[in-house]
Image (cartoon, helix red, strand yellow):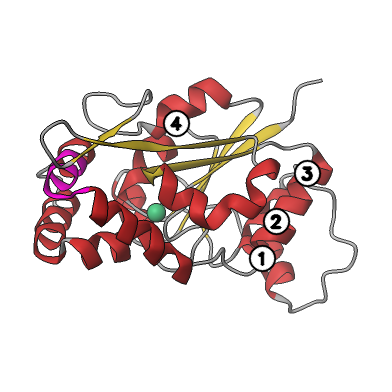
């Protein structure tokens, strides 16, 4: 029997509270990263171009520093209970990050066996210095084109959880979207319906209301989960 849904979840700023890739890129290449981010958020540069430029400016010791920097980060509270809920309901969880595999794995190693798949960009030393980021999921615009990952792994309803620019592509092809800022802003501009979320309890409450997760045993009235379940249908704006 096929699962009723598949959850596709971003990593930086979604599983983690802070955008960890932003923090580690700023730590190793502050000026370059600041410019790349400004151009990315103005849609002047594609995600693929920005990552290629960043990779070329870094070396293997920068990668080591970035990996070590990840020890500051852990999944936001509610992540593990959310994985429990999905597992009980038979809903696969696909972690899909536009960041780098060794950075994501540094944080998610203890939970790795519970993820149906972990998709992120690969990183290798470049011939003649620098680094190369690559991915079998790249397209003309993105190093990791998350919408392609949905096509590959999406059984049943395709549920997307994200927070920023790398999630825009998959949000446009999803059946149910959960977004934090700044992703909400770009979705509203494009009239794409979405639920705003603050923590994984909010997401679980909506999945319960949609019949994808079994009803909570007892969500106390007035609790964040009960409030989220009582929220009206998603707004596009
Ligand atoms: Mg993110």
Residue 52 among magenta residues: yes
Which disc, if any, is residue 173? 4
Which disc, if any, is residue 82? 2
**Is 61 in front, or is 42?**
61
- Crowdedness near tag 3: few (<14), some (14–19) or many (≥20) residues, C-alpha within 10 Å: some
- Residue 220 location, quadrant: bottom right
How far apart are labels 4 and 1 at the CA level?
26 Å
Q: Quick check: marks 1 and 2 in contact, CB under 8 Å?
A: yes
Outermost residue toward the right? 217
Secondary structure of residue under mark 3: helix
| Residue 174 on image: x %, y % | 50, 34
- Mark positioned earlier in the residue sequence (1 or 3): 1
- Mark positioned earlier in the residue sequence (2 or 3): 2
How far apart are labels 2 and 3 at the CA level?
9 Å
- What residue does disc 1 label? 78
Which residues, given as a range, are shown in magenta? 51-59
- Crowdedness near tag 2: few (<14), some (14–19) or many (≥20) residues, C-alpha within 10 Å: some
Quadrant in which the N terminus is drawn: top right
Quadrant in which the C terminus is drawn: bottom left
Please, what is the dominant secondary structure of the magenta stretch? helix
- Mark positioned earlier in the residue sequence (4 or 3): 3
Secondary structure of residue under mark 4: loop
Which disc, if any, is residue 23? none
Query: In the displayed structure, would residue 49 be above or below residue 136?
Result: below
- Residue 216 location, quadrant: bottom right
- In this image, 108 relative to 78: left or right? left
Q: Quick check: marks 4 and 3 in contact, CB under 8 Å?
A: no
Q: What residue do we see at 74% from left, 46% from top?
A: 86
């Amino acid at each position: 029997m096929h699962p009723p849904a598949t959850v596709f979840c971003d990593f930086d700023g979604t599983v983690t509270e802070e955008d960890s890739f932003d923090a580690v890129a700023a730590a190793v290449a502050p000026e370059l990263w600041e410019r790349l981010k400004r151009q990315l958020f103005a849609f002047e540069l594609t995600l693929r171009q920005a990552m290629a430029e960043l990779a070329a400016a870094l070396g293997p010791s920068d990668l080591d520093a970035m990996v070590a920097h990840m020890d500051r980060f852990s999944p936001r509270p509610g992540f593990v209970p959310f994985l429990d809920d999905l597992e009980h309901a038979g809903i696969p969880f696909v972690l899909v990050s536009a960041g780098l595999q060794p950075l994501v794995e540094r944080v998610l190693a203890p939970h790795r066996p519970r993820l149906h798949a972990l998709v992120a960009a690969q990183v290798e030393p470049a011939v003649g210095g620098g680094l190369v980021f690559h991915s079998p999921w790249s397209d003309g615009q993105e190093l990791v084109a998350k919408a392609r990952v949905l096509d590959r792994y999406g059984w049943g309803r395709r549920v997307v959880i994200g927070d920023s620019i790398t999630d825009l592509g998959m949000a446009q092809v999803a059946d149910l979207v959960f977004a934090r800022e700044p992703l909400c802003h770009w979705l509203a501009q494009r009239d794409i319906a979405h639920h705003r979320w603050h923590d994984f309890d909010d997401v679980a409450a909506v999945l319960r209301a949609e019949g994808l997760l079994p009803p909570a045993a007892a969500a106390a009235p007035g609790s964040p989960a009960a409030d989220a379940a009582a929220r009206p249908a998603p707004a596009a704006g």
